[in-house]
Each structure stands twice: as structure tokens, then as C-alpha cells.
Image (cartoon, rainbow, N blue to C red):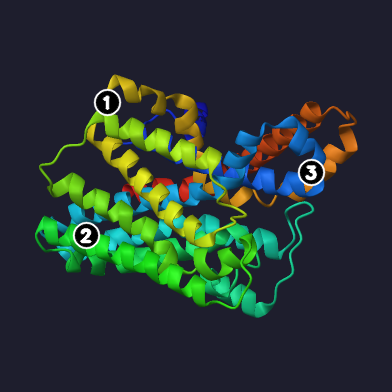
Amino acid sequence: MKSTWFNYLKIGEKPGKIPELDGIRALAILLVVFHHFATYYQEYHHSFFKNAIPEIWQQAMFNGWLGVDLFFVLSGYLIFHHLSTGYAKPNHRLAFGRYGLKRVLRTFPLYFAMIGLIVFGLIPYYKTVYSYSDLLVHMVFLQDYLGAHLLTPMWSLATEEKFYLLAPLLLFLLRWPLSRSVALLLVIVVFITLLKSLMMHQTDVSLNAISYFELFRAPFHYAITSILIGVLVAIISQGSTVKAQPTLFWVSVLGAFGILCWANLYQAENWHLLNGLHLLMVLMFGLMIWTAVQFSGAPWLKWLTGRTLRTISVLSYAWYLAHYTVLPWVYRLHRGYIRSEEPWIHTLSFLAIYVGISLLFSLFLHYLIEKPFLLWKDRV
């Protein structure tokens, strides 16, 4: 019995088929967590935040919303890769059936459990105003268009679920020669980017971070560009004789890091420039994943395969759904117990409490809700 419980509680020991992708997934959730820390903390403690954290790191944190795009690119690659591999098997219907069941077991239990926790007010201090129609919107995954009033980060789950439905059709449409499939995907991505820019130019709304998010970030027909780049990576990785070069990985990492630290992609002065830089970042993410897949196992990628990042990767879905909900709780704990007026103590203590509580909450969600269904998924 002890051995059974010990095995159940193990986490982060078994790497994925491409361990480097575990590390990249961990980096994606860290970007998102730091983004919400920065936006929430500076709203209530602007002077502490400004004085404690160098401006370059403030900028990187605010730009951390791009971590969701890194998730999208990963999802596009992994889903299309696994689906196309399964489609190559003799029984296509069985392959698609297993694909659908695996997606349901992976995403639905934790998603609907979080909705239940929010609706019944079981998360300390997390309060949100919603109607029955808002609840219905989340049930049918339309919050990317109609607003994620229960929990803001849930907007991306609506995008993911729509892609899961679209992926088999996309697989059928991309049965062309490699060059045509690549060209089609690139044309679609560029078209969507240009369409977004045109619609931004014609809008009567004065754009800020919130209005940009609601109009041009969350809707599926805009957000899918990042997923399509992941699909593009999957197609090239499987069918192309062109091999990536190690330097491309470091170019993509340094390029993405440079944009994160020096470009204002949160409260932009030029939203059309943001649109272009957003696409550039997504392309950098695609290069990063392509080269990581091509050179999996290389010594210079070992830093992505460590136990810490792997554990964070395992918890990434639970942490993504949990981290935003604990912020009001963290605020009250911090205000009640931290008395220091020293900016770095005030700021880092808030961050430490935030990371600690959100991780504990994600561990609770993982073991109690997520893992039983993941074990079932592995047996499908």
C-alpha cells in the first residue's frame, strides 16, 4: 500500500519523449505567472514594484503574457504530431476516437473542477461577478469571444478546445506535398496578422491592454496563428529533409529574450508594431521548438531537461488555472504579516508567498483531480 501511494505521489521523474519540450512548457507557465504577479502587484504597490525591480525585468514580466503563445505553439506541434502519427495507423476511426477521448481526459476534469470551485466560492477571497449566461459560455467554450468572467486565464482553454476539433480537418486539408502545406499555413498566418492590423486601424475603440485583449488577442480566429505555427513545425519536422542548425536555437532564444526585455508589448504606444512583434515572437517560439525537437538529447540542451523544470511542466496546467485565483488571498496574507517598508523585501516576499501558495494549490488540484484522469488517459 505504501509503495502504491509513493508511486502515485511521484512527480517529474519520468521525462517526456522529447524532454526539452517539458522545459519549454515550464518556461511558458513561468512567463504567465510572472506576468500576473507584475500586473497585480504594481496595481496595489506601484512604488515598491518600481523601486525593487530593474526596469528591464519589469518589462519582461509585463510581456509575460506571451507565455500563452508559447503554450499554443507547443500545443499545435504536439497535437498535430500525435494526430498525424495516429492517422498513419490502419484503423483511422479508432485513432480519431482515441484522440478525442485523450483530449477530453486531459482538459475537461480540471477545467470543470475549477469552474465548480469558483461557482461554489471555495477559493479563499476569490470573488467574481458572473451570470448564468456567463456560466453557459464557459460550458461551451465561447469565453474567448464572450468574455472569461469566471476566470480570465480560461480564455485560452476555449482556443485550445476549438483547435482540438479543427485539428482532424486540418490534417485532412494538409495532405498535400510538404511545400504546399507549408505555403498554405504561412499564407493563413500572414493573412490573419494583416487582417488584425486592418481591423485595429478601423476600430473606433481607443486601444489599451484590456481592449486589445478582448478585441484582438482572445478571439479564436486571431489566437490560432500561434497554434498554426506549431502545426507548421510539426509538418516540417516530420516531412522535410531540411535540418535545423544549433545556432537557430540560440538565435530564437536570444531574439525572444531581447523582445521580452526591451519592447513594450503590454501598454504599447503603437499597436500595429505590437502586432508585428507578436508574430515575430511566435516565429521565434516556433524556431525554438523545431530546433529542440531536431537536437533532442544534445548536451547544450540539457538545461531544459532538469527535474525542476520537468516538475513545473507536469504542474503547468493546474498551475495555469490556479495561479490567478490566489492573488487576492496572497494580498491579504502579505498585508497582514509583512511590515517591512524596504522595497525589495516587500516585493520579493509578495512574490514568494504568491508562488508558494499557487504551487501548493496546483499540487492539490494535480493529485486530487488531474492525475487520476491522466492515468486513465495513459491506458487509452
Kindly report which numbered mark, 2 or 3, lies closer to the viewer in this rendering: 3
Among all residues in the image, which is located at the extreme top? Answer: 299
Q: Distance between the residues labelled 2 and 1?
A: 29 Å
Check the image and report above or below for 86 versus 310: below
Instruction: Identify the element where label 1 is drawn.
Output: loop
Residue 129 in sight here: yes
Q: Tell me the quarter of the picture where residue 18 sits.
A: top left
Callout 2 amino acid: Ala
Q: How far apart are marks 2 and 3 (CA)?
A: 52 Å
Residue 7 in sight here: no
Check the image and report above or below for 244 versus 163: above
Residue 107 in the image: state x and y as whole percent: 46, 57
Mark 3 crowd level (few <14, some 14–19, many ≥20, 10 Å Cα)? few
Kindly report which numbered mark, 1 or 3, lies closer to the viewer in this rendering: 3
Instruction: Identify the element where label 3 is drawn.
Output: helix
Residue 191 in the image: state x and y as whole percent: 32, 68
**Could you say which disc has been placed on residue 150 in the image?**
none
Kindly report which numbered mark, 2 or 1, lies closer to the viewer in this rendering: 1
**Could you say which disc has been placed on residue 297 in the image?**
1
Q: Mark 3 points at which residue?
A: 46
Q: Tell me the quarter of the picture where residue 17 sits.
A: top left
Q: Name the residue under label 2.
A: 95
Callout 1 amino acid: Gly
Mark 2 crowd level (few <14, some 14–19, many ≥20, 10 Å Cα)? some
Left or right placement of residue 21 versus residue 293 in this view: right
Taking the spot 48% from the left edge, 65% from the top edge, the residue there is 158
Callout 3 amino acid: His
Taking the spot 21% from the left edge, 36% from the top edge, the residue there is 244
Q: How far apart are marks 1 and 3 (CA)?
A: 43 Å
Front position in the image: 273 or 12: 273
Check the image and report above or below for 228 versus 201: above
Left or right placement of residue 42 versus residue 170 in this view: right
